[in-house]
Amino acid sequence: MPYAEDINQCNSIDDIIDYCHNALPEEYKGKPWTHPELMHGINLLASDVALNCYMSAYGDMHVTKCRAAMMNFPFDDIQGSIEIVDWGCGQGVGSATIIEVLKQRHLLQWLHKVTLIEPSSSAIERANDNIRTLTNGTVEIDMKNLFLPANGFVEGETLNSIGYRYNNIIHVFSNILDVTSIDLGAVAKMVASAHGKHFVLCIGPQNGAAYRIEKFCSVFGEQNYFSQINSIRYARTRRTAHPYTCMTRCFEYNGATIDLNKLALVDERHEAIYNEYDLRLQIQNHVLSYQKARVAWRLENILSVDDIMYIDAVVNEVAVDFIIVRPNKGILLLNVFEENLNECTLSEDKREINVHGQLYQSPVDLISLCQLSIKDGIEELLMSTIEDRRNFSLIKKAVVFSENSIDEIKKFFGYQDSVFNSTFIFGKEIIDNRDVSQNLYTTISFLYNNNAFDDVVRRKLARIISPSWHSYQEGRIDMQPIGVQKRLSESSMTQQKISGVAGSGKTQVLAFRAVNAMKRTGGDVLVLTYNITLANYLKFRLSEIREDFSWEKIDVYPYHQFFRIRAAECKLHVEFGSYQNEAFFDNSKSHKKYSAIFVDEVQDYTTEWLRIVMRNFLLEPNGELVVFGDPKQNVYQRPLDTNGDIRLGVIGGQWNRQLTTSRRFTNPCLANLATAFQTQFMANLPTDDIAAENAMSNTFNFQTLTYIDLRQNNSYESIVTNIINIISNDNNEAKDFVVLASSTKLLRNIDILYRQKTNEQTEITFISNEVLERLKQIHLVTDEKVANWKFNRDFEALERTRKQLFTTDKRCLKISTIQSFKGWESPSVIVILESDLTLHNTTFRPMSPQTIYTAITRARENLYIINIGNDTYHNFFYNQTV
């Protein structure tokens, strides 16, 4: 069947790339870039197999880079008809991606013409079919089967003009300007040869020829780039997880006279030019060291068709040099230690290595932490290892000491064998001796199937390591900041403190500003929270934004998890006091840095944490750093200044207090309740003037504020019966409710009894009673036999994983501790007031005014207070709800 008919059912360029990959012979599915016709992705292609290999190998890269180039495109400047010119179009991936972006923005009806320029007749025919399929044949396609102007001899006819016809011309130069034979001046003259608005998209790899993009752009004079990305590790391919680079220079040409003399002002660089799959490019860009690249090359050559290798991956709480995933078999974690052990000393407990005065965590200890972290990060994998400890063997671990022989390594550590604590130890032999690397899978017993490592686990791991692109159409149409929110959402090189009342949109401002910072800088952005569930909530809010962006460019972590990841990246040992140690990263230069950093719920942060983040992880000393907080939700009792503001110790000047209108409350009673609660119980702090949004229009919506006194009848049976009655008597569904309390034990009992009575599921921030009992059974814990360290280890891991997975978008009742629900919101909230007991040895007070204020301000429409033993707040809530 002809190609054009085969792709007839494809709805996107991604579908077409998938078709091409699936059509590959088995020998090329694992490494499509090795087809002899490709010649590093720049050769003229003729055969169908070669064309399919190119799409499989490079299609993802082209699409993502073009999407990145369009993130800040000035769509408002387009008025009237549009045409696209795809220079050196290949199979039309660039123009196809632009077409999809225009379609998402409802501009496709204005596209009337696509000009395809490509010397390969086979490739341009494919491009024609691809564009015709994606536009349903409604757009004129002008195929120019010609070479671009060249500096020397070409074996074919050369392009000398373009027949522009429409007002808005989008020029796509995707992976073409870095071809050294192209005459940049001649191409520039053709771009500037017509009137109208010209939008020039220059996109390519960050390789030895990347300077040619700058050279080409220079002839157009001073331009304001709407995309200017310089990334030596931008994203990973979907199938092979191979990291790739990205460089963009995109501008709206202002019609100024071009100056070809400027071509000579940009120096020619005579660096070697490598393609994205050549490990030497990563060495050239200082992403991989020479020794790590040699290890990577050995590993690449043992991968089977279905194996995937991740380089410098971050999973849960660790950074790992290499992860190999084998479907149905398991995972291999491999770190490389590049120092010469003969010049190092080992600590007495063998946990740290002294390298020229700098202490590093033992690589053997570090890889074991990596194993634990990956196991804990995937619920199914965690539970399978708890049920059967032998499933730990699903996660293999190995360390390569690149500068020493295996005998030297054994002598240094005092090992008798090349396997220690289930970690396989390799010396430089694995690099120098092909036989050692070829037998790696056999050596570590990485050959056998295990049902516990199924497709569910594999897909979850892939999503964690290499998240997908977030497209404009995935966002909510009604999710747009307005007024003050919109102004505060604008990204700029500033350091700022933003305070706002509950429900005023602090989280929404943070989410929009993070995306805008990524779009402005083209770099990586960090969003920090305090608790685990709030990190998940921020990802949820980011997903609602109607913008194109790469998930790989925005890191969202709780502080402690972020600290451990960066420490593992630097091979540093983390102790209890490390999180407060401002000098911890002083001698580490290799960790990731960010173009912008945002901190949510900053009232939960210590000054030391903020200084560590600010000093070590901003790309520029005065880079964008914005913190968001509310002293009314200061549940951990951080110190306040004389104005009642959080005392940060960083970022001078006044707090921005423009977020004064709560947009959470649609029920006027809730707004009044929050204000009255502040006045009575938080008199030492300034009172926020909270008003309900559209209060007048909601007066007759039968929204509820109810107080239920169960102090004399506070059995679990009574509590759950009241919860069920509240939900059944309300106009909403169970999915619109959340139950909040401070005690996990209380909530666990409510959860199981509710499920037994209703036969409905729940979404919880803690492990269920059934899982707890199973854990006790596994570890032989009873009322008479106290919990052992193994029980506590598994319990904490399961609790942490449950918090990481918690979400509010499931169609069931949510049950959470108050502290885990900070930052979230729900249409209806049931708050359970417990006794006034204070937890020992902690600054957290379960029933403090700050905690209760946090709880009652989570509700948008309806609030129910169930008092099971609290006298402090009884009169207040009773009087407020009479």
Image (tube, grey):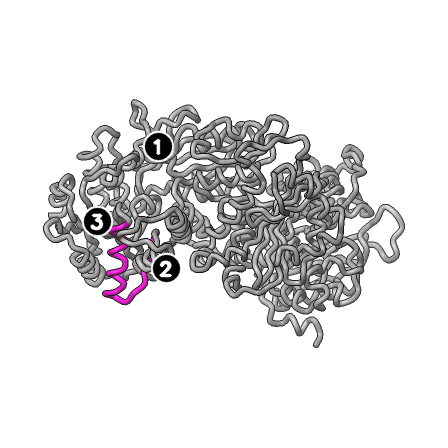
Q: Can the viewer see residue 634 in this picture?
A: no
Residue that numbered label 3 is attached to = 832
| Residue 574 lies in the magenta stretch | no
Q: Nearer the viewer, residue 837 or 256?
A: 837
Q: Residues within 10 Å of mark 1 (few under 14, many from 20)?
A: few
Residue that numbered label 1 is attached to = 657
Q: Quadrant of the N terminus?
A: bottom right
Q: Is residue 349 above or below residue 203?
A: above
SS for dot 2? loop
- Looking at the image, which residue sits at the far bottom? 1
Q: Nearer the viewer, residue 14 or 275?
A: 275
Residue that numbered label 2 is attached to = 810
- First in sequence, mark 1 or 3: give its number: 1
Q: Is residue 410 above or below residue 620?
A: below
Q: Is residue 615 above or below residue 539?
A: above
Whether residue 109 sits left or right of residue 434 in the image: it is: left
